[in-house]
């Protein structure tokens, strides 16, 4: 475990998350998730975490592993068609991950998720996190609409609101 990483995480404050994702930005992201889910039967969740603390930090948990934990905690894996997708952003590490359940992952594959990540990354590098997340939500929704089109009257299995940790 690197001292620089610990320092970044200890110095990262929740105010930075609120500055980058004020309530209006989170509302627009929620709206993008809701609009996308109107076109498919999948479930999209967005989680932003300013920094790790406690056990995840001192275990030196990588962003990918943390995203998998959150995917499980939020029960994104528990959708009827195994088509839940998590977009996870860890600000202190300047890292983000897309975690997809096996139903959609088998259709999109590593290259498809990597392409979406590259589209998001250009906005993140420019400091436009909201736009990057919305682009990611829209791209994930296009994939879900292709492979899991919306059935009339299908339930919304998970909340659409972004989670700030």
Image (tube, rainbow, N blue to C red):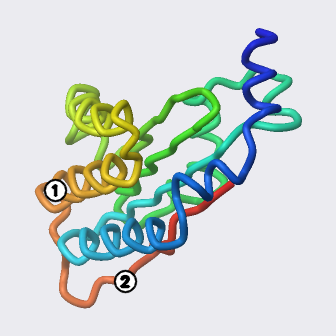
First of labels 1, 2 by sequence position? 1
Q: Give whichever of 158, 152 is nearer the camera.
A: 158
Badge 1 crowding class, 10 Å Cα cut-off, few under 14, some 14 to 19, many 20 or more, is some
Residue beneath the point at 38% across and 64% down: 43
Residue 139, position as x, y percentages in the image = 21, 50
> In which quadrant of the rendered image does the C terminus lie?
bottom right
Compared with residue 157, is residue 71 higher up or lower down, i.e. above or below?
above
> In which quadrant of the rendered image does the N terminus lie?
top right
Residue beneath the point at 82% across and 32% down: 10
Compared with residue 60, is residue 131 higher up or lower down, i.e. above or below?
below
Residue 152, position as x, y percentages in the image = 19, 87
Is residue 17 toward the left or the right of residue 81 in the image?
A: right
**Foreground disc of the pair 1, 2:** 1
Residue beneath the point at 73% across and 37% down: 12
Where is residue 2, by image quadrant?
top right
* Alpha carbon distance from label 1 to label 2: 19 Å
Residue 113, position as x, y percentages in the image = 28, 35
Where is residue 33, by image quadrant?
bottom left
Badge 2 crowding class, 10 Å Cα cut-off, few under 14, some 14 to 19, many 20 or more, is few
Is residue 149 toward the left or the right of residue 117 in the image?
A: left
Callout 1 secondary element: helix
Residue 6, position as x, y percentages in the image = 80, 21
Callout 2 secondary element: loop
Where is residue 53, by image quadrant?
top right
Q: Residue furthest left?
A: 146
Q: Give whichever of 125, 109 is nearer the camera.
A: 125
Image marks 1 and 2: residues in contact by CB distance under 8 Å? no
- According to the picture, the residue beneath numbered tag 2 turns out to be 155
- According to the picture, the residue beneath numbered tag 1 turns out to be 142
Q: Residue furthest bottom?
A: 153
């Amino acid at each position: 475990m690197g001292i620089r990483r610990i320092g970044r995480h200890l110095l990262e404050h929740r105010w930075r998350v609120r500055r980058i994702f004020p309530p209006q930005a989170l509302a627009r992201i929620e709206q993008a998730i809701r609009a996308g889910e109107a076109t498919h039967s999948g479930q999209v969740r967005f989680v932003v975490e300013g920094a790790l603390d406690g056990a995840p930090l001192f275990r030196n948990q990588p962003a990918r592993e943390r995203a998998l934990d959150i995917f499980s905690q939020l029960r994104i894996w528990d959708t009827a068609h195994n088509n839940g997708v998590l977009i996870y952003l860890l600000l202190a590490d300047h890292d983000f991950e897309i975690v997809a359940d096996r139903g959609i992952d088998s259709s999109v594959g590593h290259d498809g998720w990597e392409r979406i990540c590259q589209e998001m990354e250009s906005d993140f590098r420019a400091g436009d996190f909201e736009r990057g997340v919305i682009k990611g939500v829209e791209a994930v929704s296009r994939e879900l609409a292709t492979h899991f089109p919306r059935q009339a009257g299908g339930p919304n299995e998970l909340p659409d609101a972004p989670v700030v940790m």
